[in-house]
Image (cartoon, rainbow, N blue to C red):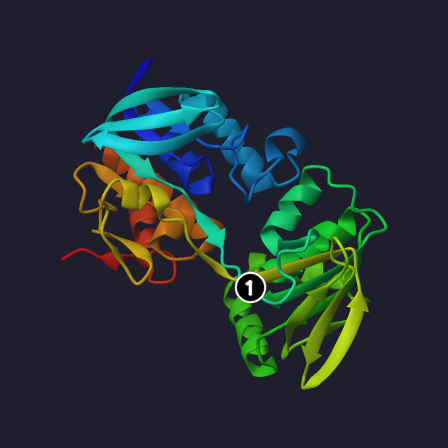
Amino acid sequence: MREACDLVVVGAGPGGLAAACRAAEAGLDVLVLDAQPEPGGQVWRGEARKGANRLARRWLTRFAASGARFRPGARVVAAPEPGVLLIEEGASSFAVRYGRAVLATGARERFLPFPGWTLPGVLGVSGLQVLVKDGLPIRGKRVVLAGTGPLLLAAAATIHAHGGEVRYIAEQAAAASHWGFALQLWRHPAKLLQGALMSAALIRVPTSTDAWVIAAEGEGRVESVRLSVRGREERLRCDYLGAAYGLVPNLEVARLLGCETSAGAVVVNERLETRVSKVHAVGELLGIGGVDQALVTGELAGLVAAEQPIPVELERTASRPRVLRPARAA
C-alpha cells in the first residue's frame, strides 16, 4: 500500500497541528502521522474528547476543519529513499511519498536510573501523568514525585485532580535555582497564573528542594522510597514513584532521515529547513521550549512548505530568542 501527499507531518502535537493547519488551509494535500490514537500529542492528550483546554480546543477544531488527513497509530520505521517514508500501522505497513516533510516529534523524558528503578510502580513522571489521564485507577493511591523541572508540579496537579494522594514532591534543584526559575515566570503571565493555580491546589503537599531518590524499595513492586532531603535520609511508603529529570528532543525520526544535529537539537535555517532537502523541523526538536515555541515554529514551517507569505506578527514572534532557539545552519 502506498500513500502520496504534498506534505507529510510526523507528530500531531501542537507543532504538528499548527504546521498541518497552515499548509492544508493554503491548499496542500497534508497527511499527519502519529503513534497515538488521536491528535494532540502528549501535552494535549485526551483534549479531543474532553476539550477542557481552550487553546487545545481551538487548534484541534481548526485541524478538524482544515482538510488535513490524520493517520493514528502510525509510526515511521524507515526512510528507504529521499521523499519516501515507510510507516508501520498496527500489523500492517505502508509507504508515504511526499513533497515536503515537517518533523514535529516532540520530546521524551530523560530518566536517570537508581537502585530499584525497574520495580513495577516506578515510572517517569510524564508517563505516570499520561496513564492517569488515560484512566489508571489512582484514587486513594499514595504517590511520591521526585526529580527536577515543572513536570513535577503538572503531574502532581493531575494526580491530585484524579483523587490520588501526592505524599511528597522532592525537587532535586537547589532552592536558589528553583526560585530563579519561578521569578522568570513574571515575564509570562499566563504561565505564572497556571503555576499559581497548580500550587494552590497542592498547598498541603510536602515539598522540598535539594532532595532526590536514594532507592526505590519493595517486594515485587514499589512499596517505599528512600530520599535524601537536604542531607538527611527519609523513607516514605508509596504505591507509585514518579521520577522526572527533564525532557530531551525526540530525535529518532530526524536521525533516521539523516538530519544534522548539534547540542542535542536539529540544525535548521531561518526557514526551519534541515540539512536534508525539503525536510523541516519544529517545536521541541529545536530545543525544549514548550507549547508556545511549538505553535509558532509549526505555523512558520507550514507556511514555508506551502510557499505562503509569513505574516509580520508571526515572523516577529518567531524571531524572539526565547521562542525560536534552533541550532542555526551555516
**For this view, does 290 lie left or right of residue 143?**
left
Q: Residue 158, can we see it?
A: yes
Q: Viewer-proximal residue, 216 or 312? A: 216
x and y percentages locating residue 239 in the rendered image: 78, 55
Establish if 300 lies above or below 173: above
Establish if 175 lies above or below 89: below
Q: Residue furthest front?
A: 219
x and y percentages locating residue 299 in the rendered image: 35, 40
Query: Residue at left 43%, top 35%?
Result: 17
Q: Residues within 10 Å of mark 1 (few under 14, many from 20)?
A: few
Identified by mark 1, the residue type is Pro
| Quarter location, residue 46 | top right
x and y percentages locating residue 12 in the rendered image: 45, 35
Q: Viewer-proximal residue, 172 or 233? A: 233
Establish if 153 lies above or below 75: below
x and y percentages locating residue 251 in the rendered image: 35, 48
Query: Residue at left 79%, top 69%?
Result: 236
**For this view, does 320 lie left or right of residue 211?**
left
**For this view, does 141 lie left or right of residue 252?**
right
